Amino acid sequence: MKRLMLPHLALLTAACAVAQPSVEAPPPSRAPVPDAALRREAYHRRVDEVLHWRASGAGRPDPATMDMAAIAIKLTLREDLDLCSARVIEMMKDPGTGPFWMFPTVCVAYVGRDLLTPGARAAIRNAWRTTRQLRGDTENHWAMYYTSLYLMAELYPNEPAETWYSGKSSEENLAEARDYLVHWIDLTTSRGQGEYNPTHYIGEYAIPMLFLATWAKDPTMKQRGHMMLDWLFAELAANTLDGVLRGPASRTDEGSVIERWNSLASYFSWLLFGNTPPIGGYGGWGLYFAPLAKNYELPEVIYRIATDRGGDFVQRDRARTRRFWRYSDELSPAVYKTNYLRRDYAVGSTQGIMNDAIQGHAWDVTWAEADPRGKHATMFSLHPMSSERAMQSQFVTYPEPMIKGVTFEGKPSYDSPDKVVGVSYYERVFQDLDTVIALYDLAPGVRFPHINGFFSKDLVNVTEDKSGWIFARGGNAYLAYRPLAPYHWMKYLHRNGGWAKAAEDLGGRLLVSPHLKNGTIVQAASVGEFKDFAAFQAAIRALPLEFKLEPVPIVKMRTLRGKEIAFTYGQAPKVDGKTIDYAKWKLFEGPYLNAEVGGHKLTITHGRLERTLDFNTLTITDRVRAN
Amino acid sequence: MRPPRILPLLRVGALAGLLGLLTAATAATHDLYLCAAFNNGSRVMGSNDGSSNGLFKRTADGFRHVGINYPLAISATFDPRDAKVIYVACLSGVLRTLDGGTTWRLVTGWDETEPKSIAVDSQAPDHVFTGLPDGIVVSRDRGQSWQRRERGLPERGKYTQVVRADRARGGRVLIGCESGIYLTENGADSWRRVLATKETVNDIQQSPHDPRRWIAVTQSAGALESRDGGATWKIIPGLPADKALYNVAFDARDPQRLALASWSHGLLVSEDGGATWTARNAGLPGEGIPRAWRTAIDPDNGEIYAAIFGQGLYTSGDAGRTWRAVPAMEGASVQTFTFVPSSQP
């Protein structure tokens, strides 16, 4: 658990009086740019937009407006160099204590290594001697921590143990950091990401990897950084709908889970793919990517995957859960992700595993919006689990204080019965194309013994049908939601980002079903597939559907796509009589991304373009396949 | 017959508390170290909230911060040959100082994280044992290098909350894990389970009066006692098992007196060797039951300490009947108490 040190975007935005053109402008064109030079030019323009916005909003007459991002950017632009040095010296008098302080400081140390005064450089170096740094307890903490330590140890080689906060010499720090980073990359490229599809934390991986790719002296580490950037952005590309990251997430929050666009991932989509607006303040942390962004060139194959939604595709991938210290037969069980993307909407899910005790998101249907800003273009259900045992499984804590602690530390919605973020021990999910079945078997006595279904303010024609289905339209998608137990409605009250203490009414409703044995079925289709809304409803009603909730929830149904599905809580689902065997799933399998479990090799494909990232040999191979 | 109380402290007010500390410090034959945080346990990964956290040493003026400002220091232990050698289990691993806190080294690597407890074998003081969320690491060179020594531990269920070395017999170490208590009698070359539990064993303490007597407290199995050095265990009747018990403390001066801390039950005291227990929560802070996080009994004067989560440190000279706040520890979360013989160099 941690308090994510998000910059106060509102303050940041206020401090920067100049406009944020792409934040305020109409959404960008989603038409792919086939010309590589034009694409590159547009990418550079976006990078420059970020740099100039932050640089112009900081500095004289008030140097206190310069945070580490502003300093890094001003150094990049060769502006106010004297002010940068003075401000660094001032800020290093009160250094922070962990990875969110370390990586901005590394950024300034490297960008300014030939620009800062000797005094400013010495102030940074001295802070790395005097201030004990927390390593944190999550994979993103460690990616930042060890990348930062690695680069600082390379920047200051051959220095003795007493000159480092760790009490280890430059060489010892370098070796430890390298060992961890290589371990993490090996693990990720063989068993998948632990923090997969994170709405915000993508920056906490992409930024360190860009640092490595840019600054590591060791060519193998530089190459690893570069290849991991491709890996991260290939996953982002394959999981976005017009630049909006949707579907399951290892870690997210209320703001992103209902307004899917509203995440740092959108900043990266904007910067790299140019197909969605960036979030305000360019995501805060995104500012640390910008100074080095021109050192990275997005491979065309990834760009094409991100921007081509002309054809439907299914991608089935593996990932890992956060570590289970207790109450699990495995340290980090496999997560099986299914993603189905179409032009008008996308459906994504995991199998319903508790991947992260606080911030997980298991499944949703998200539709495309012409302008995704402010739109709650998504539908899902969840059990709002709040559990001491779940906390203890992934945190080194006693049972009682953790829930209080997590609400105190910045996620007050965790212990709310009305929350919309979280995964549960008691949820099992199966997805086939654009049908999702989520079954719930809540233990008697469980805190919050009900299911929440999220019904957006942006749905239209919400119709509670006598058949038991609830029909609606979102964008150009028709949606059918079938609660399997009685329910009632309540107003959805939003806690922004999960951090705000107060809830606000942004519109939308929760379907609340207060029954232990429960379930949700959702089916989606494009508006263009049916003559009208009534025809969609008729098609859904006509599909055979049987279900029962005792002794455990069971659904047998035919989907809109003609598949016969049988799904029993706690058992492997069947499609057309064939049992789904998750153990046979590859690390990535689909038209765009393919990798074997344990293979350390990802093949990225679009059309005839192919890029292979081979971590066994640390090589990148591009080819144009024969027709 | 109960030994006389050497230091009948004044019981009300900060001045009284300060006087008490002064008196205690003057007469003490042990130094008291605390692992404590003033940032309310918040794991702020990047900011500096200005608080001092980590290791504190009792002085005549109260508690003095020692060495490092580290927000998540959990457990401390010492080399019995040289009290300047301190090991601190903290979020990032094990910190060690060889000079009483002037310089520190994070002696563990990336593969050891979030240790909860650390112990030195007093019969073989180069041997240091650290409990991790995923097992045990052992150093046989004063923390310079570490090895996993887990033969006999289960693949899963070895989340380790507490590590205690038998002060009387070298090579004997008990660890409290998710799946029970495990014992090694050969310095962690092998382990065997001596108690099975369904949930975590939170604390294990050896009696200062009888080295064969141990008490363990657990998350959901109440408290247990061993009279044979930890080989077999029996439930201690009369103690709750519905909620977690966090830790237990013996009184080195009075074999009849014990104290026990629990978030849900507060501070429990026995004055008859553990036969009966009484809640002694009056005067401790909090709405309803005080969230007792840790307790300890000063071996020099019998003062009972109660660390209340996020609400500071309290002490009692009358077995918990009345409490007074320890000055300058308001708002602290105290993780552990470590008493070190002050005769050590």
Image (tube, coloured by chain):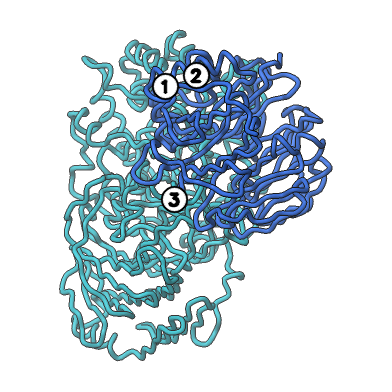
Chain colours: A cyan, B blue
Q: In the picture shown, does residue B60 fall above or below A406?
A: above
What is the secondary structure assignment of the residue under circle 1?
loop
Q: Chain of mark 3?
A: A
Q: Amino acid at mark 2?
A: Leu
Q: CA distance from mark 3 to mark 2?
A: 70 Å
- Residue receiving disc 1: B327
| Labels 3 & 2 near each other (Cβ < 8 A) | no
| Labels 1 & 2 near each other (Cβ < 8 A) | yes
Q: Chain of mark 1?
A: B
* Residue A612 visible in this rendered orientation of the protein: no
Q: Residues within 10 Å of mark 2 (few under 14, many from 20)?
A: many
| Labels 1 & 3 near each other (Cβ < 8 A) | no
Q: Amino acid at mark 3?
A: Glu
Q: Position of residue A252 (x, y in %)?
A: 38, 52
Q: Are marks 1 and 3 on the same chain?
A: no
What is the secondary structure assignment of the residue under circle 2?
helix
Tell which of B125 and B150 is nearer to you.
B125
- Residue receiving disc 3: A300
* Residue B323 visible in this rendered orientation of the protein: yes
Q: For this view, does B202 lie left or right of residue A273?
A: right
Q: Chain of mark 2?
A: B
- Residue receiving disc 2: B21
